[in-house]
Image: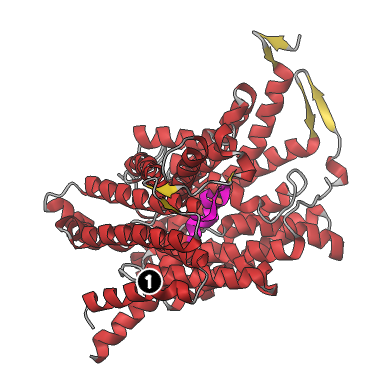
């Protein structure tokens, strides 16, 4: 019995799994965007490019330095985070007092530069990164075949998301971060080094994108435009969820991935537009977003 | 030099320019100049950053291209219908986008434009990746044949002047003043009793319709309507043109369009063609960091300070 009510369960669960995987990446990327937005009030358009950078770093590190997947999973986010810190310190901070739309345009320009550089160096066709030895193979479940690496993506990204949520909501550092979101000037008056906090926050948000990039390298083909395609979807998800809460960003990301997976099964023609359509519906019914706070 | 004199001078330059430059290249600049002016109406005068204007450029192109290929309509009707289609799309976009502000507005328009991109990618009448090729230029009113590049150029110039005039009128009308008030201080505009969202919406529709007019015209000039015009890169390009020339100035977007189009034409021929996106990104970063008022904006500042 693999069909119930005319639904092919194998195919349905397969698409649901793909949806969950996509959702994991959406969650990681929108989490990074939400953290950065909370403190800096800017949207980092380069988040997609840095995700792509993460994937390429993992690939190149393996090829030229022999750094395997597990080390890359730690080292690459640090490297990408440093790129982010340099970006924030030397490019974004000088215009922090201008209209925030300028920082959006600045990060857009940076995204063009990074993506253009990689297109120039590697062409626009995709490269592949092999799944680490330890996670090859899979488990046969009653209704589906679950490859180990895919299970790992879901588990690892949920752990990362929950860990980040815990750090922000439950630790002292997180309390500083939340206070900074509310009122940075007052916090500065209490003697906390706000500019440093801003830089580190930006670095961390960007590192999440790098981490997502390393995770994505073995499942998606590594290509220079992998970042820009996913980023626009993530923007729609951010509009759907609203950036008011960290938990909201995570839940919306995973949820939209699942909806996308279901659409791929029931009405494949709409699978790459469904999230935008959901955004339209949300804008009509609840303009501030599902978890949005502002009016 | 006052504005009237400057406009007349520019008109004279535009009329004699085909004697020096290739008319199709000039027509391309004019199409993008109109596109950038339409975009600037939103960003420069209402303070709304649309990241989805490619959708309107592309819609104008596809509608006009489709009508020219499949029906016997004359080009002016096909262009008007392309503009109407873009205006309707703009009304839908605008209605949704004005519900959010600032950065969210940019993200909503970008996402909606991506929706439109996927629609054109999959729709049967657009020929997907190939686009609509061999769009005939036809003859205006059935009389003046546009297949001659010089005739085409002057037709595009006439359309550009019409669009430019509409934008000028809008900016200097009481409606335009309210837009500026909203840009400067939205809360105060609300407290003065203006229905802010309605003003933004109307501005969005005008801007979208004029962007589609540019797209419709462009489809005739190049005999082509393709996905390039709907891609988010195009939305980025129009922002760059406006930024380089000067946000919120009347002439800035025209100058910016001229510079960016010339730059692309020059680069794509040479060995730097591969670096085109890197260079564009670099120009973006430099403009935002140290040149936010653009070329025309800087000139105006210089004039104010020294004369």
Answer few, some or many: residues within 10 Å of disc 1's Cα (few below 14, many 20 plus, some between 14 and 19).
few
Residue occupying the point 39% across, 49% down: B143
As displayed, is residue B208 above or below residue B122? below
- Looking at the picture, how far across and down is residue B195, in whole percent? 18, 46
Q: Mark 1 sits on what residue?
A: B15
User: Mostly what secondary structure, the magenta segment?
Assistant: helix
Magenta span: B221-237
Residue occupying the point 39% across, 44% down: B86
Residue occupying the point 60% across, 65% down: B277
Residue B235 is inside the magenta segment:
yes
As displayed, is residue A149 above or below residue B140? above
Quarter occupied by the N terminus of chain A: top right
Q: Nearer the viewer, residue A39 or B90?
A: B90
**Quarter of the image holding residue B233?**
bottom right
Q: Is residue A96 visible?
A: no
Q: Residue furthest left?
A: B192
Q: Nearer the viewer, residue A102 or B13?
A: B13
Quarter occupied by the C terminus of chain A: top left
Q: Residue furthest front?
A: B143
- Looking at the picture, how far across and down is residue B2, in whole percent? 21, 80
Q: Is disc 1 placed on a helix, strand or loop?
A: helix
Which chain does the residue under circle 1 lie in?
A: B
**Quarter of the image holding residue A57?**
bottom right
- Looking at the picture, how far across and down is residue B88, in whole percent? 35, 39
Residue B300 is inside the magenta segment:
no
Residue occupying the point 74% across, 20% down: A10
């Amino acid at each position: 019995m693999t069909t119930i009510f005319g639904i092919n369960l194998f195919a349905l669960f397969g698409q649901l799994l793909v949806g969950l995987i996509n959702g994991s990446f959406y969650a990681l990327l929108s989490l990074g965007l939400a953290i950065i937005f909370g403190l800096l009030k800017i949207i980092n358009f380069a988040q997609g490019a840095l995700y792509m950078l993460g994937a390429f770093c993992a690939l190149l590190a393996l090829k030229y330095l022999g750094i395997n997947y597990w080390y890359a999973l730690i080292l690459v986010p640090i490297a990408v985070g440093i790129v982010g810190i340099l970006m924030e310190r030397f490019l974004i901070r000088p215009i922090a007092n201008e209209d925030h739309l300028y920082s959006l345009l600045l990060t857009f320009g940076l995204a063009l530069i990074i993506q253009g550089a990689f297109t120039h160096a590697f062409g626009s066709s995709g490269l592949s990164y092999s799944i680490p030895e330890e996670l090859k193979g899979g488990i046969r479940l009653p209704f589906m075949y679950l490859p180990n690496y895919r299970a790992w993506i879901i588990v690892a990204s949920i752990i990362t998301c929950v860990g980040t949520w815990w750090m922000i909501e439950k630790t002292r550092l997180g309390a500083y971060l939340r206070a900074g979101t509310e009122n940075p000037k007052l916090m500065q008056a209490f003697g906390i080094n706000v500019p440093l906090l801003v830089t580190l926050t930006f670095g961390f948000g960007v590192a999440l994108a790098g981490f997502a990039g390393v995770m994505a390298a073995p499942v998606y083909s590594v290509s220079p435009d992998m970042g820009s395609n996913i980023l626009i979807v993530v923007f729609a998800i951010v509009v759907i969820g609203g950036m008011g809460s960290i938990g909201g960003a995570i839940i919306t990301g995973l949820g939209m991935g699942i909806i996308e997976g279901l659409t791929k099964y029931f009405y494949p023609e709409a699978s790459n537009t469904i999230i935008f359509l959901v955004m339209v519906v949300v804008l009509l019914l609840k303009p501030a977003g599902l978890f949005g706070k502002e009016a | 030099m006052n504005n009237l004199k400057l406009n007349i001078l520019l008109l004279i330059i535009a009329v004699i320019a085909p004697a020096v430059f290739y008319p199709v290249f000039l027509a391309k600049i004019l199409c993008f100049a109109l596109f950038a002016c339409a975009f600037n109406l939103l960003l420069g005068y209402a303070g709304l950053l649309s990241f989805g204007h490619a959708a309107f450029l592309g819609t104008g192109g596809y509608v006009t291209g489709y009508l020219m290929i499949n029906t016997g309509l004359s080009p002016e009707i096909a262009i008007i219908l392309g503009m109407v289609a873009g205006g309707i799309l703009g009304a839908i976009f605008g209605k949704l986008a004005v519900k959010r502000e600032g950065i969210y507005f940019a993200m909503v328009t970008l996402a909606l434009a991506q929706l439109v991109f996927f629609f054109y990618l999959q729709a049967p009448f657009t020929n997907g990746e190939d686009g609509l090729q061999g769009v005939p230029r036809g003859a205006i009113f059935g009389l003046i044949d546009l297949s001659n590049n010089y005739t085409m150029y002057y037709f595009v110039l006439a359309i550009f002047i019409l669009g430019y005039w509409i934008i000028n009128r809008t900016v200097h009308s009481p409606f335009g003043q309210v837009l500026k008030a909203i840009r400067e201080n939205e809360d105060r505009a609300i407290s003065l009793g203006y229905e802010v969202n309605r003003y933004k919406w109307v501005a969005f529709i005008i801007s979208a319709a004029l962007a589609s007019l540019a797209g419709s015209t462009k489809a005739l000039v190049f005999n082509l309507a393709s996905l390039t015009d709907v891609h988010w890169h195009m939305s980025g390009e129009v922002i760059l043109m406006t930024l380089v020339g000067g946000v919120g100035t009347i002439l800035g977007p025209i100058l910016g369009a001229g510079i960016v189009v010339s730059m692309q034409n020059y680069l794509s021929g040479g060995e730097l063609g591969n670096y085109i996106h890197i260079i564009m990104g670099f120009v973006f970063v430099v403009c935002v960091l140290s040149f936010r008022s653009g070329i025309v904006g800087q000139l105006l500042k210089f004039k104010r300070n020294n004369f």
